[in-house]
Amino acid sequence: MKNAVLDCPKHFDPPKTFDCGQCFRFDISSEGLVSGVIGKRFITIEKRDGKLYLSGVDQSGAEKEIVPYLGLDEDYDEINRDIEEHFGVYNNTIFEAEKISDGIRILRQDKWETLVSFIISQNNNIGRIKKIVERICERFGEPFVQDGKMYYAFPTPQALKNAGKENIFSCGTGFRDKYIVDCAEKVCSGEIDLEKVSGQNTEDAMQTLCSIKGVGPKVASCALLFGFHRTESFPVDVWIKRVLEKYYSNGIDLKNIGNYGGIAQQYLFYYERYQNGGSN
């Protein structure tokens, strides 16, 4: 078994990071171990005594791939200062949210996987999204063996295009089947080039992603934040609408929330969710 050890920076908590609705292929044990699939690796992460202990990856792979994936190379002191500057002018809610949410980092996930996962997320809860994603991976993803166990990579665009609506529907996607197929077809044909989307400004990137059937501003914003690392992207869903109405009843200028508005969104989401007993 491959193992690695990394220094754990301030403001990183694995269970919080993987329990805030940005990633759907990881589970958290009662002991706080986080485990799931990244690419073609099954990774386990444990924070202990100021270190991160990883299994499923060697030291070189951890430093080159897992550090950026987890966002460990970013200065969250500076990020939090920027968030406080932009949100603190309204009231003190963001300061309380930061305290409760401290440890959450925005992951650098695969663009394609994130886009499809958030298409699946529409009108869905986290538990159900995870089950659908798991079925899709088992049905259409490339299998790989690690430490004698079988796991599955996230399906490629071609694999989901070839699967077709009926087979995708059988994974429990419901009405989202046609959206997933349309997305796969557009990516396979080159009509949607995810690398080109990376180079577009946020407004143009939103417009490009919204040209996919079933992708509206909320799904596009989530894909940009969690898959393209556009930390300025501020997804507005039912939860965030409630937060804005509850804590910012006099309004908030969402066009002037800085480069890390999306990270602030996660703090606010986590803060409100866990004030309500962790339901989603």
Image: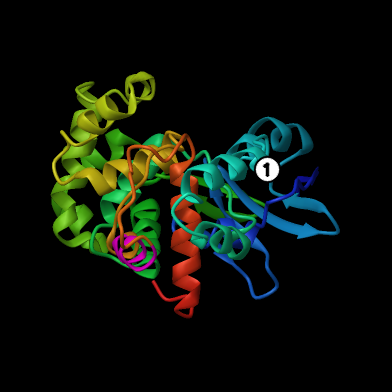
| Residue 232 visible in the displayed image | yes
Q: Is residue 99 left or right of residue 276?
A: right
Q: Is residue 20 left or right of residue 117?
A: right
Q: Is residue 236 left or right of residue 96?
A: left
Residue 269 quadrant: bottom left
Magenta part mainly helix, strand or loop? helix
Residue at 47 percent across and 54 percent down: it is: 266
Residue 48 image point, x, y percent: 81, 60
Residue 54 image point, x, y percent: 73, 50
Residue 76 quadrant: top right
Residue situated in front as seen by the camera: 92 or 205: 92
- The colour scheme used here is rainbow
Residue at 69 percent across and 51 percent down: it is: 11
Label 1, on which residue?
77
Residue 209 image point, x, y percent: 24, 34
* Badge 1 amino acid: Asp
97 vs 113: above or below: below
Q: In this view, which residue lies farthest toward the right?
A: 49
Residue situated in front as seen by the camera: 62 or 215: 215
| Residue 23 visible in the displayed image | no
Q: Quadrant of the C terminus?
A: bottom left
Based on the picture, tell me whether residue 246 belongs to the magenta stretch.
yes
Label 1 crowd (10 A; few <14 / some 14-19 / many >=20): few
Residue range in magenta is 241-247
Asked which secondary structure carries label 1, the reply is: helix
Residue 135 image point, x, y percent: 35, 59
Residue at 63 percent across and 71 percent down: it is: 29
Based on the picture, tell me whether residue 237 belongs to the magenta stretch.
no
Residue at 32 percent across and 42 percent down: it is: 221
57 vs 196: above or below: below
